[in-house]
Image (cartoon, rainbow, N blue to C red):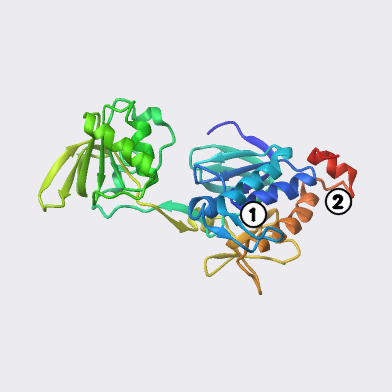
């Protein structure tokens, strides 16, 4: 366990609603850290449809998912949020009133007064390849994400997939690995053309291998992988020696550990105590955005923005119990404009 990181608010999820929550909380002098399982901010907008147009953001006739993410990041700059990517919250333990000890899957620890769950439909989970006996190797020799490139130095790597993640990590890891083999079920890739061209140039020069087929079995001892059996497009099988297998088969949405946090659920969504605060049944823990449910709920980004604003009002009472909250408008409040750096 690491030393606890102390802050006012921990936001779980760095999508549009989580980012706008930083803005609303920041206006009220609350400091935020964000944790997201993805390797970049923006949630579904950035991961699933970065180039897809969005037409229902108030005052913005047209914006892409990535464009909205970039604008929100610019908006929260004055409040200096700290963002922790590639991590998943495992446990939330109440240690005060209000005070929570929150831990991630990497052992990072937070001590916070408020927890805001803005995790959309849940956490993005990697799709597991249909290989019998893969479970014991996961986290030891089979990895669905790269968090530290250095751990793969001088190893024989088998990277599986045909999208941007598979090609990007092939190109990034090839210079430090002993040998990289890229495996895809067909000789046609969904990744950026420039990445595909660079990969093919490495194959042509003999710097790495490309194989067409699918993994059908793993070979190894306990948790240590030694090779993978590949069935080629011609039906023949061969073993490729590898120290690590990195499958990139895309992502799926799951609630994950949130189901173990003592929160009231309805059909896989968090139930609100009241829509005036968006607090869950655990005082000090809020849920905003697509992950929550209440009568009349609309799964729209603008709904999440509204929920973030109301949540911040109640959160202020927990963080500053002795401080009177005066409602102000950014258009007329000099103090708010100073916080935003526009006064």
In the picture, the quarter occupied by the C terminus is: top right
Q: Nearer the viewer, mark 2 or mark 1?
A: 2
- Describe residue 139's horizontal placement relative to residue 270 as left or right: left
Dot 2: element: loop
Q: Secondary structure at mark 1?
A: helix
Asked whether residue 220 is in view, the answer is yes
- Which residue occupies 15% across, 52% down? 233
- 268 or 230, which lies in front? 230
- Pinpoint residue 271: horizontal percent, then vertical percent: 62, 66
* Near-viewer residue (88 or 50): 50
The residue carrying mark 2 is 331
Q: Residues within 10 Å of mark 2 (few under 14, many from 20)?
A: few
Q: Earlier in the sequence, mark 2 or mark 1?
A: 1
Provide residue 211's location: percent of width, then percent of height.
Answer: 20, 43
The residue depicted at 23 percent of the width and 29 percent of the height is: 205
- Please identify the residue farthest to the bottom as the structure is shown: 296
Marks 2 and 1 in Cβ contact (< 8 Å) = no
Task: Tell me residue 12's x, y (percent).
Answer: 59, 49
- Pick the residue in front: 2 or 204: 204
Residue where numbered disc 1 is placed: 17
Residue at 47% across, 53% down: 124
- The answer to whether 297 is drawn above or below residue 173 in the figure is below
């Amino acid at each position: 366990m690491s030393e606890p990181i102390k802050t006012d608010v921990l936001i779980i999820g760095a999508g549009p609603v989580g980012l706008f929550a930083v803005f609303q909380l920041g206006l009220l002098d609350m400091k935020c850290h964000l944790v997201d399982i993805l390797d970049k901010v923006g949630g579904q907008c950035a991961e699933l449809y970065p180039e897809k147009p969005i037409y229902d953001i108030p005052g913005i006739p047209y914006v892409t998912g990535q464009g909205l993410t970039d604008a929100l990041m610019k908006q929260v700059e004055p409040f200096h949020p700290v963002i922790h990517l590639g991590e998943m919250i495992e446990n939330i333990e109440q240690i005060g009133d209000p005070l929570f000890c929150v831990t991630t899957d990497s052992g990072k620890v937070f001590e916070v007064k408020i927890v805001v769950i803005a995790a959309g439909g849940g956490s993005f989970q990697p799709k597991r390849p249909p290989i019998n006996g893969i479970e014991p190797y996961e986290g030891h020799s089979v990895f669905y994400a790269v968090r530290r490139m250095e751990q793969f130095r001088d190893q024989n790597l088998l990277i599986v997939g045909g999208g941007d993640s598979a090609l990007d990590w092939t190109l990034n890891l090839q210079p430090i690995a002993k040998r990289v083999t890229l495996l895809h079920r067909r000789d046609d890739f969904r990744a950026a053309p420039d990445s595909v061209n660079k990969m093919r140039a490495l194959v042509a020069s003999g710097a790495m291998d490309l194989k067409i087929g699918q993994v059908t079995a793993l070979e190894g001892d306990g948790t240590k992988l030694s090779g993978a059996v590949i069935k080629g497009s011609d039906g023949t099988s061969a073993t490729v020696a590898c120290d690590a297998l990195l499958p990139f088969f895309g992502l799926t949405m799951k609630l994950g550990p949130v189901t173990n946090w003592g929160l009231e659920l309805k059909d896989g969504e968090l139930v609100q105590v009241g829509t005036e605060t968006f607090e869950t049944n655990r005082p000090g823990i809020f849920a905003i955005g697509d992950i929550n449910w209440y009568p009349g709920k609309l799964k729209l980004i603008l709904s999440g923005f509204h929920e973030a604003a109301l949540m911040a009002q109640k959160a202020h009472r927990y963080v500053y119990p002795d401080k009177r909250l005066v409602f102000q408008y950014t258009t007329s409040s000099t103090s708010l404009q100073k916080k935003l750096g526009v006064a």
